[in-house]
Amino acid sequence: MDPRAFCTQARVLVVAGKGGVGKTTVAATVALVAARAGLRTLLIDVEGTAALPALFGHHQPLGYHEVVLAEAGGGPDEVGLAAPIRARSLTPDDALLEYLEDHGMRRISKRLTSTGTLDVIATAIPGIKDLLVLSKVKSIEKGASERGSTSGPDLIVVDAPAAGHAVTFLASARGLTDAVTVGPIRSQAGEVLDMISDPSRCRVLLVTLPEETPVNEAVETAFLLEDKAGVMLAPIVVNGVWPRLGLGDAGPVAESLDVRLTEAEVASLGRAASFRRHRQDLQAAQVARLAEGLPLPQLTLPYLFATDLGGPELHTLADALEDQIMTLPEGTL
């Protein structure tokens, strides 16, 4: 499958996964792949951390208004992009402020947030905070669709909350349509549900690691998302996979080197090779178990032996993701 076709299957791609699996890095990588393919991409952060912009060399948390993370023709470390990557943060408070201001209630909106009334409302109406954020995503998606191809993002990548909250986040609209029968909340929930349940508008890209607990949670999350939120899943990303090396016994390896090793060094080399083979086998077993438990195409990304990730690392991951996407049959999902 062509990477551009993959990135245009839905206008909104929600990236979700257990905390620590590299969800934010994968969201940035997908945005990079899309921008390379000439798609104007908007990254949305819903948790308000600096992790997402830091991957592009920006060290301040995102605000409510869009900023350019990578220009067309430039990009992280000046690697060329065919389209820009923009980003913004979406919080319930800001989404509510904008909604009220758009409806002529600016004074009320300020009082609601300054007095903590929004928290009271959120307690009284479970799911309302998530609905506020999703309503804004829906508004951006709908606006871009109505304006056509000349303005607005071609792809919206949402860096979703960690797996447990991702389910309630995406299921909030369905819960509120069941609980509320009339009024603006019911109307907004219905419109969000229409977006989430339409695979041409929204899909979820799950991220996991080739380890037992993340695999277990990914399988559980996938079925919960389909059952509770009614959203279609894209291929699952298996992140942090160690490349398989054909490692033999330490003796022949040591003999092939141009330096003379002591017996202790040969023994250390043997233990290192044994550890690597064991790690490779464990990962292969978990990837197979994931395929058995979750019938979705898999996209694997390599483990990067780097302390900090930035432009070069993102492009390495984007290269790998493009290669994996091109192995998918045309029309996948």
Image (cartoon, helix red, strand yellow):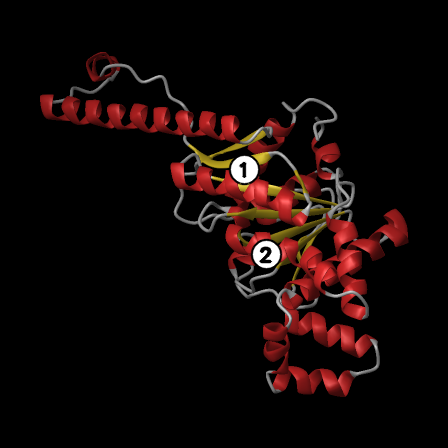
Residue located 40% across and 25% down the image = 285
Quadrant, the N terminus: top right
Q: Quadrant of residue 251?
A: top left
Q: Residue at x 76, y 39 (%)?
A: 8
Indicate which disc, 2 or 1, sits on the residue closer to the N terminus: 2
Q: Position of residue 156 (x, y in %)?
A: 71, 50
Q: Which secondary structure, mark 1?
A: helix
Residue carrying label 2: 168
On the image, the x and y values in percent for residue 287 come to 46, 28
In-front residue for pair 261/146: 146
Q: x, y (%) of residue 173?
A: 70, 58
The residue that disc 1 covers is 317
For the C terminus, give its image quadrant. Answer: top right
What's the amino acid at mark 2? Thr
Look at the image and tell me whether residue 276 can be seen. Answer: yes
User: Is residue 210 left or right of 272 when viewed as pictured?
Assistant: right
Q: Residue at x 68, y 87 (%)?
A: 111
* Circle on res. 222: none
Q: Is residue 57 left or right of residue 64?
A: left
Q: Is disc 2 in contact with disc 1, using a CB cutoff of under 8 Å?
A: no
Inspect the image, locate mark 1, and give the three-letter code of the amino acid beneath it. Leu
